[in-house]
Image: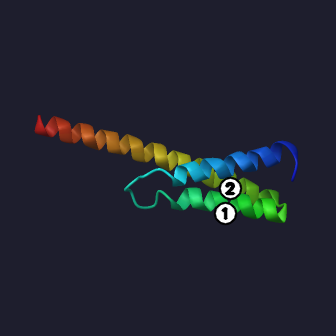
Amino acid sequence: MARGLVLSLVAWGIAYGGLMLCLPLPVPGTNSLPALSIIFFSAGLIEKDGVFVLLGLLFSILATAYLIFTFLMGRNALQWIWNAIF
């Protein structure tokens, strides 16, 4: 668990979560899922527990899906406003 591919996965997951936390999004809840993924990845690394690593991966995937959903809905809202005004 502490070597090889799994350690690389955990390291990339923590780095990806950190990058997602750096995004300046004004939408509530955008920092919760990346923070939870970092917490679970870190706990899995400390405890050498694969369940926590899988939970970190799950929360990372959910955070990415939520981020994509937020961007798409924001783009649709801006297009709707633009079409309503002009």
- Where is mark 2, residue-wise? 56
Residue 13 lies left or right of residue 65; in this view the side is: right
Q: Which amino acid, by three-letter code, is at mark 2?
A: Gly
- Where is mark 1, residue-wise? 39
Judge whether 72 appears above or below 7 on screen.
above
Q: Is residue 1 visible?
A: no
Residue 32 lies left or right of residue 1; in this view the side is: left
Q: Which amino acid, by three-letter code, is at mark 1?
A: Ile
Alpha-carbon span between mark 1 and mark 2: 7 Å
Q: Which residue is found at the position 61% from the left and 62% from the top?
A: 36
Asked if labels 2 and 1 touch by Cβ distance under 8 angstroms, the answer is yes
Camera-side residue: 27 or 80?
27
Q: Which residue is found at the position 73% from the left and 54% from the top?
A: 54
Judge whether 46 appears above or below 14 on screen.
below
Residue 85 % position (x, y): 12, 39
Q: Which residue is found at the position 36% from the left and 44% from the top?
A: 73
Counting labels gives: 2
